[in-house]
Image (cartoon, rainbow, N blue to C red):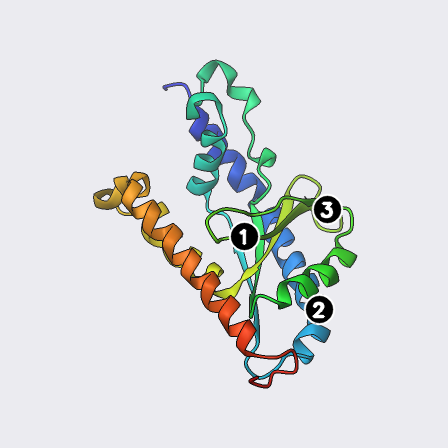
Amino acid sequence: MADRTVEDRLREEYFNLLSEIRRVVEYLDVQIRHRLLAVRGALEKFEQIEVRSRVKECESAIESLRVRQEGSVFYADRLDSYTLTSLKDLAGVRVLAFPRRRLVEIDAVLREGFAGWTADPISGDGGDGLKYWGFCAEVGRRIRGEYQIVSMLTGLFWEVEHSAIYKPTPRLKDIAESLRMRERSAAVLTVLRDFEEEFERSVGLDGKTQ
């Protein structure tokens, strides 16, 4: 029988952790939805907040760990040094809000409930947002949870982009490395941000058109 590869051991680790990952996701989802009840109750008719949860897939988790290594390579002689528990986003929740001005309010509310979590800002080419990670000791002590707060328009574009570019079929494997495609993605994010900023300029804080 051939020796197990690093990937084989990580796949085994993933499925040993999976029940805890799911518990962390469910806990985060419930806690965040509960804390946002008051914010949602005060929304104007044109405003929206959505909470989306996800468990990182096995192969995606392994690839995320791989790209964090020197040269993006696993070395067989370092087998025991690799663990998926070093990832911060195995269990994730994303809060999407429109318009953008609600992000600060949502952030303030959630930070009260996750005061000890580490901030890890999202930035780049119009796709800025807020991100925090930490442990949910109530349901798991090995898995870090992560929540993000982003513009709804940006977040929805990220979902399409990730599905189409970063999880492609073999025929589209090289598209993520295309400079032209990266430029187009950055341009979309900039336009979405410009749209939101113009919308907010056109709508007063009371929701009435100026």
Which residue is denoted by mark 3 in the rendering?
117
Which amino acid type is marked by label 1?
Answer: Asp
**Number of disc labels:** 3
Name the N-terminal-most of marks 1 and 3: 3
Closer to the camera: disc 1 or disc 3?
1
Q: Establish if 85 lies above or below 18.
A: above
Which residue occupies the foreground of this view, 182 or 25? 182
Where, quadrant-wise, is the N terminus in this rendering? top left
| Marker disc for residue 34 | 2
Q: Is residue 133 visible?
A: yes
**Cα–Cα span, label 1 and label 2:** 25 Å
> Which label sits in the foreground, 1 or 2?
1
> Do callouts 2 and 3 mark residues in contact (Cβ within 8 Å)?
no
Label 2 sits on a secondary structure element that is: helix
* The C terminus - image quarter: bottom right
Q: Secondary structure at mark 3?
A: loop
Find out whether the residues at labels 1 and 2 contact each other: C-beta distance under 8 Å. no
**Amino acid tagged 3:** Trp
Query: Which amino acid does the dot numbered 2 rest on?
Result: His
Q: Position of residue 168 (x, y in %)?
A: 30, 47
Q: Residue furthest left?
A: 171
**CA–CA distance in space, label 2 to label 3:** 18 Å
- Mark 3 crowd level (few <14, some 14–19, many ≥20, 10 Å Cα): some
**Residue that badge 1 annotates:** 128
Q: At x 53% / y 35%, what residue is drawn?
A: 13
In-image side of 121 versus 105 (left or right): left
Could you tell me residue 134's position as x and y percent? 69, 44
